[in-house]
Each structure stands twice: as structure tokens, then as C-alpha cells.
Image (spheres, coloured by chain):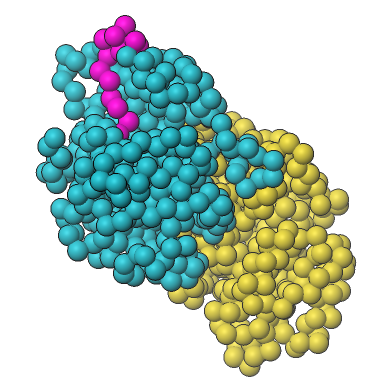
Chain colours: A yellow, B cyan
Amino acid sequence: MKEPTIKDIKRAAARINPYVHRTPVFTSLAVNRLADAEVFLKCENLQKTGAFKARGAVNAVFSIDEESAEKGVSTHSSGNHAAALAYAARCRGIKAFVVMPENAAPVKKAAVAEYGAEITLCRPTLKDREETLQAVARDSGSVIIHPYNDLRVIAGQATAALELLEEVPSLDAVIAPVGGGGLLGGTLLAVSALKGSTAVYGAEPAGADDAYRSLKAGHLIPVRDPDTVADGLRTSLGDLTFPIIQKYVDEILTVDDAVIIRTMKLLWERMKLVVEPSAVLPSAVLLNRRKAIRGNRIGLIISGGNVDLNRLPWQQGTNWRE
Amino acid sequence: MKEPTIKDIKRAAARINPYVHRTPVFTSLAVNRLADAEVFLKCENLQKTGAFKARGAVNAVFSIDEESAEKGVSTHSSGNHAAALAYAARCRGIKAFVVMPENAAPVKKAAVAEYGAEITLCRPTLKDREETLQAVARDSGSVIIHPYNDLRVIAGQATAALELLEEVPSLDAVIAPVGGGGLLGGTLLAVSALKGSTAVYGAEPAGADDAYRSLKAGHLIPVRDPDTVADGLRTSLGDLTFPIIQKYVDEILTVDDAVIIRTMKLLWERMKLVVEPSAVLPSAVLLNRRKAIRGNRIGLIISGGNVDLNRLPWQQGTNWRE
């Protein structure tokens, strides 16, 4: 595998520039006080499609040659990557085919449909998702764009950290959530190339801690029966993202759901930002495992803001387990 | 009455500058499409204390002479002005005494207490609030700062529109919510002084439409038994705000609660911003009474983001009536 270089990442930034937002970096004295640090939140919840996933999907879709692109692109995803790929395909004027598990959040299904993608529902197992996608891709002749185990996607996701470092050059540490590892992998590549002295941490739900365990074991251990409110982080690392993380990450910090939910509510209340559970992970580890994190100026990648407003996890009676 | 001039407003802007945020102006293609207009949202939900009220309170508190300030400031308010006055007093290092109705939202009481104000609870009638405030002010010797019927407060609130016009000079119209009229009054003064050709509309809940009816009648008609989810807009115009509104406003547009709640959810979903019901009014009238509004480039004052996250108005079983 040839991991994306800083040149690839900068090329991705130029490629996606017309189609994605340069998201703002917010600060909050209340968060600083609680974290006992200077905290910079890169707000990818304000990104196109409501998540950083637009970066990777647009980069991948616009990297495909004209002839291959003609028959469209396809993927399987329970949410943000699906919407992002649908959006990216619409930007390029090609078709998108999306395989989604039946139990995906209605708000996420609606977003994908609104961007004009063709949705195929399947049972919510990884096996069923992959088999259905193979069939859909075969029938349509479309190019499969994996949500994270794809170098073009990783290079695209890296552009969020690139922008953060441009705006706040002197960070002691950056924390990104880790699910499949596309965002954390990209963040690691960008930060290690531009600021070798800046630490990078992955923040992972205790109920889906395959990155933590894989790193400890020295080999990929897929997550089994993930149990976490952070629906975007239930996936396992891929064989492209794992080596990048293994090579560059300072540490994977885990946090349990009660802390994620409490921190989520705190960000909504204090920063007036709608952030989804997966996006809360960096703040949750920072506010609750401060000692493990090096330095005083901390950048957090707030990965997305797509939540079902009828089903907020701090509400009594809400069962977020799918 | 001598209404604040543009010079007063600019002096207020300089005075409050160290203590308030210059809030961002956001745009959203989804909102533009739904409004069939170019929409610019001045995000005072991201203001200190979570609402524009910080502007007026800080301006008033820092306008008081040293000797009078010594014994502190006081007010009655069910929420945002209370927190704003407490914050402003803390900025100046003086005491704040706040009379709040017993049924004020717990999240708002907590915010006021957190800024260090001394809270006195009273029954939730205007009469009781005013009598309790008189007693508190007499006992403490503090200076009463009215939430809106105060020229220093009006000049402070005007600075939000001042910033909006600086950032987006060519607006056809500006829409602000109207409760007591401090924000709308200030907006009218700033816009009419700087951009006579820009229309200014007030957006008011149908369930508390005293501004609409007062304007029509040509004299103040206080609201009786206000019934609206927009808790910040249940108050009546004052004798200082009414003449300003009467003189400058293009029109008061009203909208009912079902539309307010629907629009609130839409802003949370599409813009990932936590906005409170009162702050939704301008968007609600724009998205639903488009024809009445002149021009294509519309500025909206998003007044605040303080909501009780356990009690969102679109949730089944939530009773927001207090």
C-alpha cells in the first residue's frame, strides 16, 4: 500500500474545494474551562451533508476517470457516507447506488434519497451489506467507493485536519474519532506531515473498541457486536487504515456511552451546536481523560451533526440500540 | 424621549466590544432554496450567554457611573435578560439582583445562578414581578435595568444589526423577532440610519401579537394571556420601544406556533444550530409568508439558543405551556 502523501492531500483539497465548505473553527470559554485547556473545534457538523464524509466522497468521485465514472458509483453505508456519496455523485452529474441496512435512521435514509441516490435496503449485517453491494455494483457497472478503506477517501478526510492546522498552526494535540479509521487515518497523515511535534489521538467508544484492541494486539481485531450510541463508529478498521493508525497514532483513548451522552448534551447547551454522538468522542475523551492528553492547545475534529431529533439519547425512554 | 442615534449605537458597539462576540453570519443553500431568497442568519445564539441580550445588558451596565454602579444592578426577567445582566455585572465586577418567576426554565435559572447573580423568585405575573423588583432594588440600592424599555439597552441590541450590515451591506430586508421591542427597536434604528432603503420587519407569534395590534390601533395594547411556545416573546412593547417601532417598521408579520415549531426543527436539522423558539420567528415568517417580504437578500436576526434540551417542542407529550 502507498499511503497518501501531503501532496496527495493538498491535491485532494484543491479538487474538493468547489464542493465542500471550509468549516469554521469554534472556541468556547466554557469548554476551555471544563477541559482546562485551549480547545479548537473544527466543525464538520457544518460541512456539506452534515459530516466530514463529504470530503472523502467528493475526492474519490472526482478522482475516477471519465469512462469509469459514466456508470456511476456505489457503496454500502448506514448513514453519513451514503449521503456524502450521493452528494458527490450529484456534484459530478453521475448516478449513485447506495446499499443501506433496513434499520438505518429514517433521517439518514431521507437525506440519501434527497440527493438523488438509488437506495437498496438490506439486512443489517456486514455480510449482507457486502453481498448486496456486490450485486448492485455488478448490475449497474458502477464503481464501488468504500466508506473508509480507500486511499482517495482517506486523502479527502485528511483535508479537515489540513484546514485546522492552517487556521491554528500551534496545536499540541489533535483528537479525531475512530470508527473505520478514514478520518483518523487522514488526520494522522496530514498532521504528521505538517506538524511532527503535534500529538494525534484517536477517540473510540468503549463499546466498539476494535482500534484500541487491534493496536494493542498488533493485528486487526474486528469489532464484534458493537454496542454504542455512536452509530458512526460501530465499524471496524480496514486493512488500509489500520497500518496508518498503527504507524502514526499516539494513543487510542476510549470512553463509555454515559460520558458520550453527557458530553453531547453539554456541547449542544454550551456551544449551541447540533453534533451527533460519534462527533462527540474527541470532546468526551478530552473532558474526561485529560491527563493522558499532551499539551494545552487541543484541536478536536467534530465529525458530524446528523441526528434524529425525535430520538435524542439523553431522553428518558429513548432506546438508541438498533 | 430621545431615541438612540447611530452615534449612540456605535459608541455602544465600542463599549461592549471587549465583552461580547462578533457573532458569525451563516448561510445555507437548503434555507435559500426553501425561502427562494438569499438568506443571511446573524447568529446571536452563539453570543455570550446564548442570546443577543448580552449586548444591551453590557451596554447598560457599563453606562452607569461609578458611584451608582457600586450597589449593583437589578431586573426582572424569565430568562435571557436575567443571564445577560448577571453576565454584564460580573464583567464589571458588581452585584446583580435578579427577580425570576418561579416557573422559569430550570436551565435559565441555572445560567443566572452560574454567573453569580442573587436570584429572588416570585409568582409568574407581571404585577408580582414588578413589585418584587421594586422591593429588591429598594433593599439593595441597586440600579434597575429594564429588559427592553431602556435606551441604553435598545442601543446595545442595535449593535447586532450594525454588525450584520457591516458584513452584508446590500440587504433588501432585515427581519427581527419582536417581544418587548428592544431588539426590533434597535434593529430599526441601526438599519434606518445606515440603509434607509432596506426594509425592516418584525416577526411576532400570533399568540402574543401585541405589536401587530398596537401598530394597527395606533396606541399600545398590552398582550393579555400570551399563548406561544416562543417564551422570549410573551412580553408587551414598552412606551420607549413602541414609538420607535411605530416610526420605522415596515410591517409586523405574525406566525402561529405550529409553523414556529416546524421551522425550529428545520433549522436544527439543516443548519446544525441550536436555536430557541423565539429566535425562529424571522425564519418562520420568511419561509411561510414570503410574498409580504420585499426583495431577495434577507437578513435574519437569530436571537438566541437557550432551550431546555429535555423539553423540545416537537416531542410528543411535551407541554411547553407553563
Residue B137: say if magenta.
yes
Residue at position x 21%, y 52% in the image? B248
Residue B33 visible: yes
Give above or below for B63 relative to A2. above
Question: Which residue occupies the foreground of this view, B237 or A80?
Answer: B237
| Residue span colored magenta | B135-148
Q: Percent x, y for residue A137?
A: 78, 82
Residue A241: quadrant of the picture: bottom right
Residue B178: quadrant of the picture: top left
Left or right: A213 in relation to A145: right
Q: Percent x, y for residue B316?
A: 69, 45
Question: Which residue occupies the foreground of this view, B122 or A266?
Answer: B122
Residue at position x 57%, y 35% in the image? B321
Residue A277 visible: no
Residue at position x 63%, y 93% in the image? A67
Left or right: A198 in relation to B23: right
Q: Percent x, y for residue B92?
A: 27, 23
- Quadrant where the N terminus of chain A sits is bottom right
Residue at position x 57%, y 65% in the image? A49
Question: Quick one: which residue is furthest to the top in this view?
Answer: B139
Residue B67: say if magenta.
no
Give above or below for A117 relative to A25. below
